[in-house]
Image (cartoon, rainbow, N blue to C red):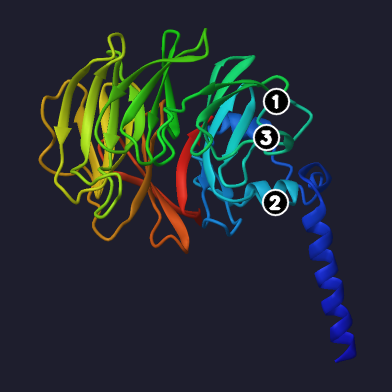
Amino acid sequence: MQAMKYWYIIIIGLLIFNSCMDDDEWSQRNKLNIDVDDIISKESVFISNEGNFMYGNASLSLYNKATHEVINDVFYKQNGVPLGDVAQSMKVHNGLLYVVVNNSGKIYVLNMGKYPHLPAFDYVGKITGLTSPRYIHFINDTKAYITDLYSKTITIINPETLEKTGKISVDNHSPEFYQHPTEQMVQYNKYIFTNCWSYDNKILVIDSEKDQVVDSITVGLQPTSLVLDKNNYLWTITDGGYDGSPYGYEAPSLWKIDAATHKVEQSFQFNLGDRGSEVKLNGTRDTLYFINGGIWKMAVNDKQLPDHPFISGEDKLFYGLNIDPVNSDIYAIDAIDYSQPGVVYRLSPKGKKIDSFKVGIIPGEACFY
């Protein structure tokens, strides 16, 4: 019993020691040593797994399209430290993978070819001091925007130095809720559009030369996502809130907006109780996909919603959706029950199953190199 007591003390001590080490001290441990050339040549897909809120069990998965191999928890295996709490989104830019870890208030920067002497997924830096970061958008090599759920600002950073260089106020000075909570971003000429999801109904328009909000577009309650089609029309889908929400509850809707004039071209209404989310475009940006139970598909020139889902959502909990920009393969992400490892279904543009594979807990996004 005395020996077990000492082992218990040693284990607790190690846990405390590890918890005190920062990311830089943790790096250089347990390396997978994944060759960057393998990542690029095999056209790999990165999957971010949110993990459970406040559990710190977010993770990254790597999927090889050619061999169908999967490596889960690649960040931890490469760097020896957990990714953090809620992996919200990812973006590849200039040979680096930026992973936005929402509830940890940071963005990890991982090597994906910028540094040839380092393996893939090697930790090379981080952006900290963020409140609740959601997405990152690169305007050029020295300027990027980071949206935020709670700060009422968009942070401006220099990707070369990873330092903050400014911020854009999006505060509408309303005492209610956290308006405007900014989310996904798309760019048309010098203008950046961002949807405001939580307890909001706006698409904000930002002049990236002045770093100022210059306009807003009213849509339905809680726009969840945003894309720009080949004809320069913005598309957003709303979830309509929920029954009993203090902000309101309505049927979800799909909105088509002229990016040049900021005018609503058309809106499409779903049924009350539906849950619209994740509007995406195929590689040629002429076909929309979105989640509403199942996966739905429609051409950007269609004047009405389709009659039935393209892919059935029966016995599945589709939580994420991404389209390969090269071949338009569909990656439909099933969170299952939000507690066990989720499943990613890879489907052809015609909806034929190519593959399926297990990843981490609450997979949310697929990112293509």
* Residue 235 to residue 366: above or below: above
Q: Where is residue 106 in the image (x, y as percent from the top left)?
A: 64, 39
Point out the image quarter for the C terminus. Answer: top right
Please tell me whether mark 2 or mark 1 is closer to you in this view.
1
Q: Are marks 1 and 3 in contact (CB under 8 Å)?
A: no
Residue nearest the observer in this picture, 36 or 307: 307
Q: Residues within 10 Å of mark 1 (few under 14, many from 20)?
A: some
Left or right of residue 148: residue 257: left
- Residue on which the image places disc 2: 77
x and y, in percent, of residue 156 in the image: 60, 21
Amino acid at pointer 1: Leu
Quarter of the image for residue 102 reads top right
Mark 1: secondary structure: loop
In the rendered image, which quarter contains the N terminus?
A: bottom right
Q: Which residue is labeled 3 in the image?
A: 110
At x 84%, y 85%, the residue is 4
Disc 2 to disc 3, C-alpha distance: 13 Å
* Circle 3 Cα neighbour tier, 10 Å, few/some/many (<14 / 14–19 / ≥20): many
Disc 3, SS = strand
Q: From what the image shows, is residue 60 above or below residue 207?
A: below
Residue at 13% in and 44% down: 308
* Amino acid type assigned to the residue bearing label 3 in the image: Leu
Tag in front: 2 or 3: 3
Q: 186 or 79: which is nearer to us?
A: 186
